[in-house]
């Protein structure tokens, strides 16, 4: 048990001493068992104060000490270094936060703040009494990394690790890599397309000798501890050879009788149970969706490169680190939320972006040419009650950028933005002004007075009490209503 403890109480230049009676605190804690010395200092982090602590530790044989100051996030390493420079084990030091937790939190109650500071420091002293020196333990680790998720983040992480000479196992649950970026046409602020970015990264990954790429692969079992993990991977086959006759494959796809919603296009189009990927997805190979395949055999009659009897493969890898880059899901609105799932021409922003990307000379939805588009912001975000209170931070910028690109492609579009305050951060504000100059209209609803979407005389109307016009009730007739949805954690985030 420590019997020679030093306590240093920081003024933090008035941040603490203006609201806490530091002298009273010093007098109170110096009476605690084991406290050899108790001092105050204007700035504990200053070089002069650090040198004083080192001298006290050496001269008075202090075997543990407490610094009561600001957050340990700022200066825990600072005072652990002081301990080491004085020849003391750094784990014989304890940090007491009396700024964020005391003076800033109780600036209106100096008496209460002082009492709380005393209690926090007493607790820190009690911890130091029981501290034992901890020595670092070196563990031989496997110089290999498992990266989960082959989207942009996962591929960039893999190539960066490879450049450091690290072996990388890059796994992707889907049969195609690229993540969300592969869905998008022109990317916000860069004017690079998703296809161009994914192609570039895939070429780097696929030609890198240090990287092994697994598609259609999930973790089924993991064991081990820091630096040494054994992970079992299950790979679902594609059921189609990667190199095959393209004509035969095309006719095999045409012959498939099963049609399902196409997740790549966020379910606004259909695909077959056997399908070929989009140009922005890699590897450039077909796959059979066994969850929907009926095994009717029609495709195998045409294409001899298809094998419906392929089996799953189990691979065991040894890694020292697991890096999770599983990405996000776009928020899916509740049925009837702003008319979603009830009114045919209410769709989400991801669906709209795919619609624009797939459209050529005219923007068509459900067989009708679209001229009037309304965007409703913060759907599934900034909710006072409900699912997500947070702001996803990217939605405003992405929506305005998408609206600008849609206008450049379809000059006859009329576009209304119903926001709850535009949040285009930094230089992205320029996009907002560009949209205004192109004639796009911005209206603003309040958190407690949200817009309403309804069918009226066969037309879709968005009603909003517009803050910018002194809460004037405005009705916007729309051919298409786009719900600007934010980000949510992936539903399959439980990966092992």
Image (cartoon, grey):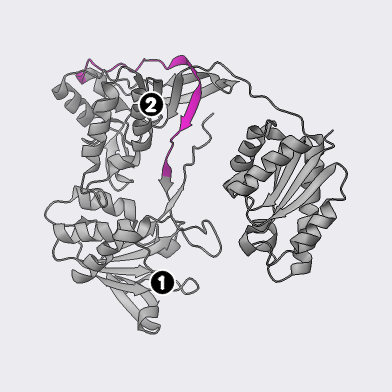
Helix, strand or loop at mark 2: helix
Give the residues in magenta: 302-328
Magenta-colored stretch includes residue 291: no
Residue at mark 2: 161
In the visual, does 42 lie left or right of 365?
Answer: right
Q: Is residue 309 magenta?
A: yes
Q: CB of mark 2 within 8 Å of CB of mark 1?
A: no
Cα distance in 3D space between marks 2 and 1: 48 Å
Quick one: SS at disc 1? loop
Lower sequence index among marks 2 and 1: 2
For label 2, the crowd category at 10 Å Cα-Cα, with few meaning under 14, some 14 to 19 and many 20 or more, is some
Nearer-the-camera pick, 208 or 150: 208
Q: Is residue 365 above or below residue 265?
A: below
Pointer 1 residue: 451
Depth check, front residue: 437 or 127: 127
Name the residue located 35 percent from the left edge and 35 percent from the top edge.
151
- Residue 311 image-quadrant placement: top left
């Amino acid at each position: 048990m420590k019997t020679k403890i030093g306590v240093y109480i920081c003024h933090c230049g008035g941040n603490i001493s203006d609201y806490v009676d530091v002298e009273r605190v010093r007098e109170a804690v110096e009476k605690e068992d084991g406290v050899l010395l108790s001092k105050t200092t204007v700035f504990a982090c200053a070089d002069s104060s650090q040198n004083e602590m080192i001298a006290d530790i050496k001269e008075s044989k202090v075997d543990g000490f407490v610094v009561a100051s600001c957050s340990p996030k700022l200066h825990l390493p600072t005072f652990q270094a002081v301990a080491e420079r004085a020849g003391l084990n750094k784990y014989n030091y304890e940090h007491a936060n009396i700024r964020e937790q005391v003076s800033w939190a109780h600036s209106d109650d100096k008496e209460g703040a002082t009492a709380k500071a005393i209690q926090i420091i007493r607790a820190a002293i009690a911890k130091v009494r029981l501290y034992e020196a901890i020595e670092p333990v070196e563990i031989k680790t496997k110089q290999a990394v498992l990266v989960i998720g082959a989207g942009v983040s996962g591929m960039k992480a893999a190539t960066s690790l490879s450049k450091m000479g690290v072996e990388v196992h890059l796994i992707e649950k889907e049969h195609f890599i690229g993540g969300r970026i592969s869905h998008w046409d022109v990317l916000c602020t860069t004017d690079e397309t998703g296809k161009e970015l994914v192609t570039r990264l895939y070429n780097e990954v696929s030609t890198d000798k240090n990287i092994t790429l697994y598609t259609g692969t999930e973790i089924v079992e993991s064991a081990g501890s820091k630096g040494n993990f054994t992970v079992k991977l299950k790979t679902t086959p594609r059921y189609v050879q990667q190199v095959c006759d393209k004509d035969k494959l095309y006719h095999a796809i045409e012959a498939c009788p099963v049609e399902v919603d196409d997740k790549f296009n966020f379910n606004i189009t259909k695909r077959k149970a056997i399908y070929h990927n989009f140009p922005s997805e890699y590897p450039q190979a077909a796959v059979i969706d066994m969850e929907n395949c009926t095994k009717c055999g029609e495709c195998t009659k045409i294409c001899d490169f298809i094998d419906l009897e392929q089996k799953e493969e189990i691979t065991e890898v040894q890694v020292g680190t697991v890096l999770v880059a599983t990405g996000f899901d776009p928020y899916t609105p509740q049925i009837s939320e702003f008319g979603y799932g009830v009114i045919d021409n209410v769709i989400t922003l991801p669906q709209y972006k795919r619609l624009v990307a797939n459209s050529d000379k005219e923007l068509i939805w459900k067989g009708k040419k679209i001229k009037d588009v309304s965007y409703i912001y913060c759907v599934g975000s900034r909710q006072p009650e409900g699912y997500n209170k947070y702001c996803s931070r990217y939605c405003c910028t992405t929506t305005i950028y998408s609206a600008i690109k849609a206008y450049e492609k379809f000059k006859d579009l009329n576009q209304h933005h119903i926001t709850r305050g535009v949040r285009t951060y930094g230089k992205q504000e320029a996009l907002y002004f560009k949209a205004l100059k192109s004639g796009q209209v911005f209206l603003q609803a309040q958190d407690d007075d949200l817009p309403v979407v309804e069918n009226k005389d066969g037309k879709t109307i968005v009603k909003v009490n517009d803050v910018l016009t002194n809460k004037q009730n405005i009705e916007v007739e729309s051919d298409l209503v786009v719900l600007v949805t934010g980000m949510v954690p992936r539903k399959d985030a439980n990966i092992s």
